[in-house]
Image: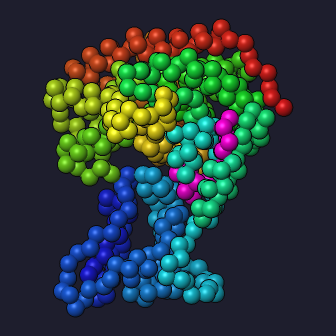
Amino acid sequence: MYYVMSLSRFLAVVISPRHPQIFLNCHTRSAVWWVPLFVPPSRATRAADASDWVHRLSPRLVLSLPCKKQLGLASSSVLNAQQFSGFNSHWHSLCLKSRTPAPTRPRAANRVVVAQAGTYKVAILGAAGGVGEPLSLLIKMSPLVSTLHLYDIASVKGVAADLSHCNTPAQVAGFTGKDELAASLSGADLVVIAAGVPRRKPGTTLDDLFVTNAGVVKELAEAVADHAPPGALVHVVTQPVDAVVPVAAEALKRKGAYDPRRLFGVTTLAVVRANALVAARKGLPLADVDVPVVGGHAGATALPLLSKARPKAAAAFTDEEAEELTARVRNAGTEVVEAKAASAGGGEEEGSSSSSATLSAAYAAARFVEASLRGLAGDGDVYECAYVQSQLVAELPFFASRVKLGRDGVEEVVGSELKGLTDYEARALEALKPQLKASIDRGVAYVQQQPTTAALN
C-alpha cells in the first residue's frame, strides 16, 4: 500500500515501504486527505501505521522516526509549513531543515500532538448564540489564536468552561453582562460581532431583524471604540449585514474610532455556498472552486459572479444556468430555515437559533477570521470577499467584493472582477443597487437618530 498525503492540489508526501519519496509542488486552496493506492497485498501497510508516521500537521508537518528512516532523512529532519490555514489549507512555503532532536519519551499511540499557541487575541460578542457558540469552537481550533474571549448578555461561562477542555493552545475566558463587556474587549486584535436576534421563522425577512439588531450592533460597536485597541479588526456577522455594517461605521465615527480598512461585513457564507453549488454542478473538487460574490449579503443583493469562477471549468454557464444558481445561493438560507422548521414539526420557538443556518454561518465566519489573522501575520497572498467601504460603485458607499487582507486590514479592494461581466451579471448588478442603497441609507439614518452610548467603566 502506498500512502499519498495530499497537502494541496499539487503537493503530496508519498510513503511506501520499498520506494519512499516526497513530491513537493506548492499550490493553494485545497484540503488534507489520505489516498490509498493499490499494490500487491504482500506490501500492504495499515493506515494506522501511516497515520502514525505523519502525526502533526499544523503549523509544522513533523515526520516521526519510522517515516524518516523510510525516507532516508536524518532523525532531526523537519518539514516546515509556513502560513498554514486550517480552514482552506493554504500552504505558503515549504522547506526541509535540520535541528538537534530533544530527548522525548515514547509517544502513546492515541496521543495527539498539539501545535504551539499563536499570538492573536480574538473576542466573540454573542458567543452564547446559535452562530457564536459553534464559531467559538472553530476559533478555539485555530493555531493562530492565543486567547479567546467569549461575551454575551446571557451566561457564557459554561461555554467557556466546555471549550477550555479542548486540548488546543488558545486560552478561553467567558464574560457575561454589560459590566464585563469592557474586559472582554481588552487587548483584542480581532472582534467578531455575532450578537442579536438569530435568523428567523419561515416567512420573515432579514429586514425584519433590523429593528432589534441595529441597536445591538450600535451598542457593541461603541463598546469596541471605547475599550478595544485602536488597531482591532471588527467583523460583523449579525444580520442584516447590508444595513448593520453602516450602523457600526456610523457608531465608530461618532466615537472618533472609525477606520474603513478595519471594519468588515462578513459575506463569506454566500461564497462557500456558491463554491459548494458550483462544484456539485460541475463535478469538480470542492477545494479547487472559487466563486467571487459581490454586492451585499441579503437575498436579493448577493451576486455570485459565475463567469469569474476558478478554475475555468467552473465558469462555463449559460445565462439561464447562472440565473438558476444565483437563485439557489440567494435562497439557501431560507431553504435551511424551512427544512429545520419542517423537521421540528413546527415546534421551534420564535427566534430559536436552531431554526437558522447556524453551522454553515459559523464555518464561514471562522474562515474569514482565519484569513484576517493570516493577513495580520504578514501573509501577502490573502484574498476573501467582504462587505467594506468601497468606491467600486459610485452610488454605493459599501459594497461586497474581493479584498486583499494584510496587517492593516483591507490592503486593496479588487475591482477587476466587475469588468467583462456577462449580460445576465451586468443586469443583476444594476438590479441589486436600489435595495442595497436603501439598506445602507437605513443604517446611517438609524444611528443619526440615536443618542451616543456613554462608555462603560
Whole-percent x, y for residue 288 in the image: 30, 50
Q: Can residue 428 be seen in this view?
A: yes
Q: Which part of the image, by quadrant, shows the C terminus?
A: top right
Left or right: residue 376 versus residue 434 is right
Q: Which part of the image, by quadrant, shows the N terminus?
A: bottom left
Which region is colored magenta?
Answer: 138-156
* Closer to us: 290 or 94: 290
Looking at the image, the residue that sits furthest to the bottom is: 42
115 shown above or below 439: below
At 38% from the left edge and 80% from the top edge, which residue is drawn? 48
At 30% from the left edge and 50% from the top edge, which residue is drawn? 286
Whole-percent x, y for residue 445 in the image: 59, 9
Looking at the image, the residue that sits furthest to the right is: 457
Please give the count of numbered marks on the rendered protein.
Answer: 0
Q: Can residue 273 be seen in this view?
A: no
Tell me if residue 148 is in the magenta stretch. Answer: yes
* Closer to us: 380 or 368: 368
Whole-percent x, y for residue 446 in the image: 60, 12
At 59% from the left edge and 61% from the top edge, which residue is drawn? 166
Tell me if residue 133 is in the magenta stretch. Answer: no
Whole-percent x, y for residue 410 in the image: 54, 34
At 31% from the left edge and 85% from the top edge, which residue is drawn? 45
125 shown above or below 16: above
31 shown above or below 415: below
* Closer to us: 104 or 180: 180
